[in-house]
Amino acid sequence: MTSLIEGRTGQWEIVIGLEVHAQVTARAKLFSGAATEFGAAPNSQVSTVDAGFPGMLPVINRHCVEQAVKTGLGLDAQINLFSVFDRKNYFYPDLPSGYQISQYQQPVVGAGRVILDMPDGSTRAIGITRLHLEQDAGKSLHDQHPRETYVDLNRAGIGLMEIVSEPDLRSAEEAGIYIRKLRSILRYLGTCDGNMEEGSLRCDCNVSVRHPGDPYGTRCEIKNLNSVRFVMQAIEVEARRQVELIEEGGRVEQQTRLYDSARGETRRMRSKEHDHDYRYFPDPDLLPLELEPEWLDRLRAELPELPDAKKARFVAGYGLSADDAGVLVAERASAEYFERVAEGRDPKAAANWVMGDLFGALNRSGLGIEQSPVTADRLGGLIDLIADGTISGRIAKDVFAEMIETGEAPGTIVEAKGLRQLTDSGAIAAAVDAALAAHPAQAAQYATNPKILGFFVGQIMKATGGKANPALVNEILRKKLAG
Ligand code: ADP
Ligand code: MG
């Protein structure tokens, strides 16, 4: 789905490539044993390696390598059995060693792809260029003191996976779908928690524009976006800026830019001519990374079922629509919850309850599915009570609201509140008689106005507290009105 910009000189296509920095889920840093926990007191998780002390030696964290390789497998990517760590040299106060250990020409993961599910039901494959491992930098705090900048090195040395896409994306919307899908895959794999608020997933956005069919235009890179919304806004704003610039006779200069969300504009940070020469060279403290094929085979065999495969199975196995299946598989925990509810029950009823009532209630209270006050087994129990006629679908909504409120079992609530459906035809007939007797004028209208039936159904439901079996009420009413 391309979304073209209408300019004075015709239509413009947006071309986007993303560089996502995903924090590796690991207890220790990439080359030191210091902890990675978020929110610790400043500089409390810093080893001498992270602080760049002279003579300290980095030691690769095997688990981080495993996480990167798993991610590569999840992206259907080429895994390189031989890769190299380089030093990327630059000066910044939050980089005490004066270089970042990264991978440059020989990354651990090569070409792969991410499949996007488009809103019109089609799919699009977006190429992954590479994934490499690198260290995060520390953090400069400019708001702690009126004149001075503080540095927190807790983040310094934490393992990041930089995931670079091909320039295959064509709209802000596609970029949003791409990030969400990538995030979903990372979370399934357990290799990155995907928490954008805590900075576990950050994105640099490369944007250029061209008339459809033309060669690629010159791109600008917008740095460090930390929400899907900002990525989408920044792309729109930057593409429009470039179109205007070109149409006014100017030329796009390759720049690094910042997105100012308050003003809704991108601003120049530095141009490529002034860009760093990083003087990459292989880090002499580290051996090249060599992976054993058997180890790789083991990781491949242990991969969980990923969103695309799960979605296909939900459509084929449960008869769900692609849209519904897509919603349910976006998070692994939701998919597992659904499957537990659906086990031995009508899958469509299960999907409706999970996506409608449950997701709605969780959204309203700001809870994730892991914190759901209603367990999958209890939601299943509620569906069983409808299926066996104990309660009506209408009453089930009230029971569910009570379950969300109290976490009680559905059966307990039904008994305590006397919500069992009334299926005793004698009792229903009595309620029907009472209603007819109370409203003789309306009853007389039935011959000429059969719609009056609805009025009586309402009266009887009111009288029985909504508990009368609707099918029985209709049947008995019809007979009595006609007779
Ligand atoms: P660099 O080495 O300068 O970072 P890369 O070739 O690695 O450049 O590209 C970085 C990112 O820019 C990639 O995600 C790529 O898809 C994207 N990109 C490259 N050319 C363009 C272009 N003309 N328009 C938009 N994005 C582009
Ligand atoms: Mg780059």
Image: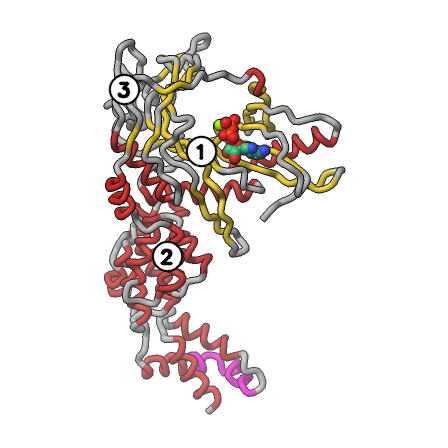
Q: Earlier in the sequence, mark 1 or mark 3?
A: 1
Instruction: Give the magenta part as a residue range.
Output: 435-447
Residue 300 seen in render: yes
Magenta stretch, main secondary structure, is helix
Identify which amino acid the numbered label 1 is placed on: Val
Structural distance between the alpha carbons of marks 2 and 1: 31 Å
- At 53% from the left and 18% from the top, the residue drawn is 275
The disc placed on residue 354 is 2
Identify which amino acid the numbered label 3 is placed on: Pro
Left or right of residue 411: residue 324: right
Return the residue nearer the eye: 292 or 349: 292
User: Circle 3 sits on which residue?
Assistant: 58
User: Circle 1 sits on which residue?
Assistant: 20
Residue 295 position in % (x across, y down): 24, 40
Residue 349 location, quadrant: bottom left
Left or right of residue 334: residue 273: right
Residue 438 position in % (x across, y down): 45, 79
